[in-house]
Image (cartoon, rainbow, N blue to C red):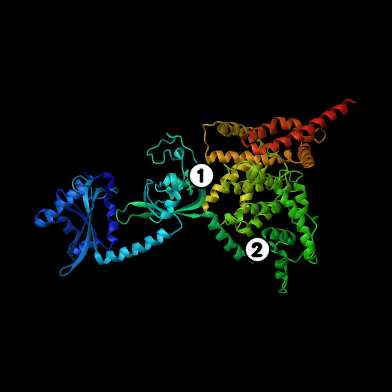
Amino acid sequence: MADPRAVKRVREEDLVAWDTLPLSMSVVTYAPPRNLWANIKRLEISGCTFEEFLSTDLARTATEAEKEQWKNRHQALEVRGETVLERSLVADGVDKQISVETVCSAVVLMPRKDGELSLLPGNGEEVKAVMIQQWPLEIKSKLDANTKYMTTLLECSPYPLCFFTFDGHLITCNPAAVEVFGNTIWLQSDIFGMGERERRGLNATNLHPSGSFGFERTERRTAYESMMDALTEEGSTFEVDLLIRRRGDEGQDSRWYCRVFAQREKDPVTGEPMIMISHQDVTNLRKVEGELGRMQMSQQTTKELMQHNDREVAGSLMVLLGEDFGLNFNAQTSDGGPLPDERSESGSPRSEDSSVSTESTSLSTRTIQLNGLRQCLEKANDWTFNVFELEKEAEGLPLQVLSWHVFLKHNLIEEFNLDHVKLVNFLRAIEVGHSDNPYHNATHVADVVQSMHCLLSKGGLGKFVGRLELLAGLMAGCIHDFEHKGFNNDFLIKTQDDWAIDSNDKSPNETHHIASAFRILRQPECNFLHRMPAAQQAQLRKMVIDMVLATDMAEHMAIVSKLKSDLLKRLENPDDEIGDDPPEALKALVLQGAIKVADIGHLYAVHEVHIAWSERLEEEMWRQGDVEKESNMKVSFLMDRDKPGVTKSQPGFVDFVVRPLFEVWVACFPECRVLLDRINDNYNYWKSKEAADKAAEGV
């Protein structure tokens, strides 16, 4: 018998796809001889209807030569498992004959799935049959020439292109795919780069909801499942940016950040669905997209940045963008037209005390001012960064200036094709939305963004942080205290504040920060993500939500415990290989831990900065205590202005809250050891001050 792996399996309802082909096709059986199906071209050549074709008695009408031909075909197809190729003259109508190439191959014809009446003999069971294709040589020659041309183009393409069955087996591919993935290519393991644990249960049917397989839900598995869900109809498409393995020149695998594009197609011969997969380098794509966007929007950028009566900020940001602010400024005024919004020369929207240059300020003076800002931002990569210096140099707008700087530093605007005008609008709106609280203000948020920048870029988190995680981490830092009122969650719940009502008493501050910031992002003029694919936006949003919710101190010990049990134990276990693409849950946990570290980052700041933040926090807590007294409420712990406050309890706070987090964090990421050392230095200061105060009280 023929090798069953070489036999095509065709479902009866898929035969209709062959009606569109310019060749004669039919399906017959030879034991006993019987016609089962014919396409429109075959019926035209025969000059009969489909019903007449089916009712033809082949055993009675066939010549001896035809019967001998059937016998030879049967031996080749059924016994030796070969494909039969013949050339002959056949009738084309009544008075015409044409040269054809006949291809006979074994098929298994399967009954219909839609429940309609089957044409198959017997009880609608599978039938072993022969598919006969007759190509008119004139048409075949043209198709061969076209196929050769297309094949040449495909083979010359620098981008991998593959065709797969829906169960992941390769049908064919071009040389570029072989160069990237090797001679053996599988959809799940090569195209999506999934390991054995990630692939578990993907092809299982009737899997119990509780899960009979222990698999890891990673970004790659999620992308694969999303693709399979999307490719439900012929012509449907799916695309995702993914980090996958790539075979190196010397057999060493490397990582390739590429855009995977998938489209559902139908095999024109078998009618079976197949998946076309192509790859393109994301970095190169986004360089082209980013440069085109920059060229198109440069003039618009200048205009938009100067529309809100804050030319000093516009100048700072334009210089950071790489534009010549002086030339752009002159270009706006050289035509004699007024600049946008010339009603006032006031400074920042947050601070009336900000020093603002007048229009008469020379460009050289402005350059000197900007040099101070540049020098400050050059220190943004250091753990010892002083955010109060930035607050001064950025003229009261540290958050938008620093956020813009780190977005540029990480090339996020170009790589993710972000709308940089709308990004500036978003950052401006977020900064304006921060109140002038002593502690929870835009300067604190800028400090957290800077700490996230350092943690994500040099804190040893590389295995857990891809490019999208980096963008999410900086964005979460930027919005994590948006519109903070200066009151803690307990106060909001006790007073039945609207935020507590809206959140059902669950993290009212953090829930509001997220919701309100995403409402800003939803505004057309602020939606800097509008070019990002919807699936990627959803993934980014989820990461940002998880991180901001983690800043609720009520979640502190739970996250510290999870860092110990879910991360540290795995890192310490030599038999547990997390791999280059850890599970999504583990990535989320690391990002949550990172923003918690950053949120109390003043504890590892230089001594003077740490003391300043501690005093600001103490004042803010006292202000809440003042409100509680006025409302005849019980004054919360450390919030009574007439009793010792935060600055008197720092050693205990470090011992019971801070040190457990940082010790497990440093154990996971030794690159952060310097942070714990600096915390200990500041801790020793508070301990010595505590001892001195006690000694003074005893005198």
Helix, strand or loop under label 2: helix
Q: Position of residue 231 (x, y in %)?
A: 41, 51
Helix, strand or loop under label 1: helix
Q: Position of residue 11 (x, y in %)?
A: 28, 50
Task: Write down the quadrant of residue 531 in the picture.
Answer: bottom right
Can residue 496 be seen here? The reply is no
Label 2, residues with CA under 10 Å away: few <14, some 14-19, many ≥20: some
Q: Which mark is residue 190?
A: none
Q: On screen, 298 above or below 389?
A: below
Mark 2 or mark 1: which comes first in sequence?
1
Point 60% across, 49% down: residue: 471
- Amino acid at pointer 1: Glu
Residue linked to disc 2: 301
Point 26% across, 67% down: residue: 138
Q: Residue furthest bottom?
A: 336
Dots 2 and 1: beta carbons under 8 Å? no
Residue linked to disc 1: 219
Q: Position of residue 73 (x, y in %)?
A: 18, 52
